[in-house]
Image (cartoon, rainbow, N blue to C red):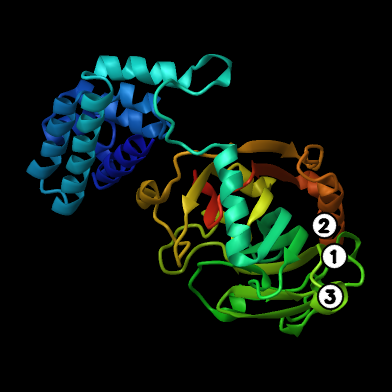
Amino acid sequence: MQVAGRLKAELGHLIGTLPEHARHASGMARHLGVLRVTCQRVVQAVQGEAAPPMLARLPGVEGLRQFVDGFMRVGADRAAAESALSAVEAFERLIAMLGGSQTKLAERLQLSVGAPGGGEPAGPRVLAGAREREDLYAAATRVTGRSCDVALSIYAFRPCPGDEALLERALAKGLIGSTVTPGGLPMVLSSGDTVRGEEEARRITLLHGETAVGRTPEAILKPFTTDPLPMVTSRGRGGWLSQIIDSDAAHEGGPIDVVTALRARHPAMDPQTGKPTLDSVWSLVTCPSRRLILDVYLHNTLERRYRPSMDALLWTATLDVAEDQKWVMRLPSQPRLQMLGRGLGGSASPLWPRHGELTAYFYDHIGWDPDGFIGFRCEVEYPVWRAGYCMAFEYLG
């Protein structure tokens, strides 16, 4: 729910501006001159998931207003405080519309979340389900002249051997059952990062270190690509690479499978901010797709430092989206994050029979031991066209 996401973002941002000693309930109450129980409820609510039940854990509207007023009294950023107050007012309007009181709103939320048999809550249907996403897929296919059965991405991250100031990334991307109608948009696979830094420290190469420029048939994973092989042309700069797939000559526009693989490295810490560069991994639905599989594997030395989460967001020209801005872009229906566990035991997917086989081949090809990695996955049937499925990683230290 957008109201919950907005409150979590705005109140969390305000709390983040406090000095360290005032970020727990007791210190916050003394610093802001607000009741301790009000601070405690806000802190507990924003630490949880931005889901409808969060609204029942918050203080009432009047308590939230007093909480924000406390920030204004201590000279907090006025724009941030007013944004938080606007979110509180949106919460007040929701209460008036759905319940009339916070208690009745909580009862409505409980009914909606716990609908028996997984059914939808009573009332007007406003959130898109699989049928609406399938309709969007069909329309986007006609608009773009492109489609595919499966869009897949497999990422693996580890500290660079011999230089832990660098993070090494291996990536396999594929379009299975991909078609381009005459005059349709070209078939392109893209990858990159949003890190600022030296170009040499952000090189993207093919799996064995070859330069990813011009005609690059070496990028293709042949056992998973239609024969005769399509032509792949690579170009890019600034940590970003596009691979243009030309299959018309060999396949006359018919469905093809194409899977490519790359390696890259970049600084483990952003030189501009001092924060970890592993903050999010995106799968962008540029091609209308029936199914999406996004796998991210972290080396066990990295995994214990991060907490993953999953979002479906409308994406813009930049993927460098601050956490407190995601509520503006977050789609009402969200995907589920799965933990695959250590190694490749959970790598198979019901959305494509060869996915487990591809993952094992990928690890063998890059020469990394999969038992040293822990995997996470997002699977979606009929992903929203022009959405970005974003696996975020909160740094725990």
- Judge the density around disc 2: few (<14), some (14-19), many (≥20) Cα neighbours within 10 Å: many
Q: Label 3 near label 1: C-beta < 8 Å?
A: no
- The residue at the point 29 percent across, 46 percent down is 13
- The residue at the point 43 percent across, 46 percent down is 330
Residue 362 numbered mark, or none:
2
Residue 236 higher or lower than 107, as above or below: below
SS at mark 2 in the image = helix
- Judge the density around disc 3: few (<14), some (14-19), many (≥20) Cα neighbours within 10 Å: some
Res 273 quadrant in image: bottom left
Going by the numbered disc 3, the residue's amino acid type is: Glu
View extreme (bottom): residue: 214
Q: Which of disc 3 and disc 2 is earlier in sequence? A: 3
- The residue at the point 76 percent across, 42 percent down is 351
- Kindly tell me whether residue 41 is visible in this rendering: yes
Q: Position of residue 310 (x, y in %)?
A: 54, 43
Q: Label 2 near label 1: C-beta < 8 Å?
A: yes
In front: 16, or 205?
A: 205
Query: How many numbered badges does the structure rendering display?
Result: 3
| Figure quadrant of the N terminus | top left
Going by the numbered disc 1, the residue's amino acid type is: Leu
Going by the numbered disc 2, the residue's amino acid type is: Phe
Q: CA distance from mark 1 to mark 3?
A: 8 Å
Residue 221 numbered mark, or none:
1
Q: Position of residue 296 (x, y in %)?
A: 66, 49
